[in-house]
Image (cartoon, rainbow, N blue to C red):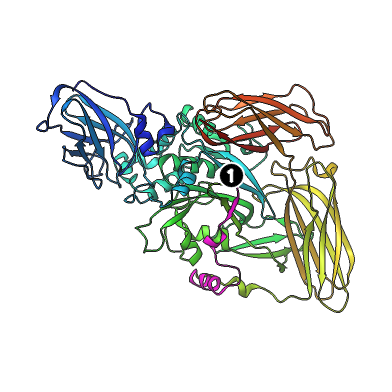
Amino acid sequence: MSSLSHPSPSIGNYHRTELNGVEQLIVRRGQPFTINLHLLLCFNSSYSIPIPFSPPCPLPGPQPSDQYGTRASFGLTDQIDTSRWSAAVTSPPGYMVSLSICSPPDAPIGRWRLTLGQGGLVEFVLLYNPWCTGDVVYMDSEEKLMEYVLAQDGIIFRGSWKYLIPTPWNFGQFEDGILEACLRILEMNPKCLRNPGKDASGRKNPIYVSRVLSAMVNCNDDKGVLLGRWTDDYDGGVSPLSWKGSVEILRNWDTNACQPVRFGQCWVFAAVACSVSRALGIPCRVVTNYNSAHDTNSNLVIERYVDENGQVVQKSRDMIWNYHCWVENWMTRPDLKPGFDGWQAMDPTPQEKSEGVYCCGPIPLKAIKEGELTYKYDAPFVFAEVNADVHTFMKHKDGTTEKIISSVQVGLKISTKSVGSDRREDITHLYKYPEGSDEEREAFTKANHQNKLLQQQENAGLLIAIKVSAEMRKGCDFDVFAVVTNNTPNGKKCRLVFGSRAVSYNGILGENCGFKDLLNLLCLSPEKRVPLRMNYSKYAENLTEDNLIRLAALLLDYGTREAYLAVRNVVLENPEIKVRILGEPKENRKLAAEITLQNPLPVPLQNCCFTVEGSNLTGGQIITEKLNSTVEPGQDAKVKIYFTPTHSGQRKLVVDFDSNKLCHVKGYRNVIIGK
């Protein structure tokens, strides 16, 4: 044997790995691939090629082992057997031989080395194969596979459950160097460093790999990818809101000796985990749970304490996040009883330890819905995120506490991007039964949890709610309203405390943005509306990057001594970024885009900067355009950027705007690239 030919582009097309390029051979398990051998002697049917098969050895790396299923030896057969390692000649006799090779659909993924007799060596990467019916990640929908495996960009939902904000994200799993970084994540995980052979064997199972990724995307216990930070101090790194995609994060980690990238928060952790899962061949999507509970003591109850002004005081570690993001990976669960295959929740954000490590999942969505809390992995924690009861107590100045009436619910509008479009798909029904249904009662009983339907208190005739203005744009003054409904025939004398504070998405409170205390409010039937003016001059300096304000209205009935609490988070709208494509988008042809943002604030914008990124649009790089001039109120910040698309199809151009007064305004434009 004299040589082997380079990987053919047709292999990439057949295995759906063409976007990875042709510099290395990348194939999916359970599916044949062909290599061409150039021989010194003419091949005939009596010629035998012994084929020992083993993974390459990263340093330090596993020794190929029959015990762990990381080595296989086999010879030529008449035809391919897709259930095991096999090889067959598919060309007529001659000096060039086409050799078809197939791995079993449960082979460990990762780097492999194929040796052919004494002279041939082929190294390749083996991925999960959701197109193969024998693979445990098989998904029977080409449209869904295009979305959950091949799509390199998407939408992550942020904001609040009353005002959902679609945020564009560049997953970029096929960009140059990203698969190498993903494989390095597997190789640097502590299980691999302790027992490389056993870890390599475990990679045949997406349950095992998902759990490894959940731990390795954060760096709390290992040389993981991201360091989380939930304060406004981002010295030594960048704000999580500055990221537009996973590519820069994974490249930074891989090229800087696996030092953690600073900084991440939940949607960043989830997005990076999605990129890695898709790169390895596991169908994956990012989901957002609004009013997400963080239960620290596993009692499935969130205990919240407020002071006599209705403002939250931190007496418990239990929290309710404005929203929380995680991912779902698609796979069968042969380790559980039948019926729990499909989407599995997996959370890489470090919150609580699981088996001594900061990871969470995978747990079947059906297990959460049915209250099966004994199933692997971390069912009680995820169940509480979407189903926990909320008990609210008022803490008085003398140290005593009393339970008050509050209508806070968790697990609202659980959202993900729709297949084939940027619209939102509501998947709440996959996690929980409708509120108040018999099925919900049964699920709570099965979960050995006191039914929240029994916790509802009798209404004493008063209701308190918060309503907001139709438009709440950043830079404007606007009103919010505490609405008291009196269902009794008599007037009620009450005290109303109505306040507002800046808040981060994970529930950490900031400074006061407006406050009102009415000691003698007469509430007549049917309702009383009390406005609170939100002035830009008051809230501007207190807002966090999340643009969130928490409103709390506490009503005290002097007659019955009952207390009622209403809480609502509002999101201030950022201005729209307009993207106009100039010219006809063609593959490998230079293209221009005009990007515009109008200053909505009553103050000038300085140090304005646009950054742009897009899979197969900007060559895996971030394009930065700075404005030299100040942008006055009402004026446009405008730039023109140039880029060269490298592949046809629909691509997402992701834009981020920053200035001294307006930070991390996101925008995007879908661009259809022709051949």
Residue 574 in the image: state x and y as whole percent: 73, 41
Q: Quadrant of residue 662?
A: top right
* Vertical order, 466 against 229 (above or below): below
Residue 641, percent from left and from top: 65, 25
Which residue, as the protein is rendered here, is positioned at the far left?
Answer: 46
Helix, strand or loop under label 1: strand
Using the image, determine if residue 338 lies above or below residue 639.
below
The residue lying at 39 percent from left, 40 percent from top is: 190
Mark 1 nearby-residue class (10 Å; few <14, some 14–19, many ≥20): many
The part of the chain drawn in magenta is 422-447
Q: Is residue 125 left or right of residue 432?
A: left
In this view of the protein, can residue 29 be seen by the observer? yes
Q: Is residue 65 magenta?
A: no
**Where in the figure is residue 97, as x and y percent of width and height?**
20, 28
Q: Which residue is more in the foreground, 100 or 550? A: 100
Q: In the image, is residue 571 above or below residue 405?
A: above
State the residue at coordinates (33%, 46%). Answer: 204
Which is more toward the observer, 520 or 86? 86
Give, as a three-letter code, the residue at label 1: Ile
In which quadrant of the rendered view does residue 306 lie?
bottom right
Q: Is residue 433 magenta?
A: yes
Quadrant housing the N terminus? top left
Residue position marked by numbered label 1 in the rendering: 155
564 sits left or right of 422 in the view = right
Residue at position x 74%, y 45% from top?
573
Residue 639 in the image: above or below residue 157: above
Q: Is residue 308 left or right of residue 120?
A: right
Tell me what residue is drawn at x 52 percent, y 58 percent.
381
The answer to whether residue 218 is visible is no
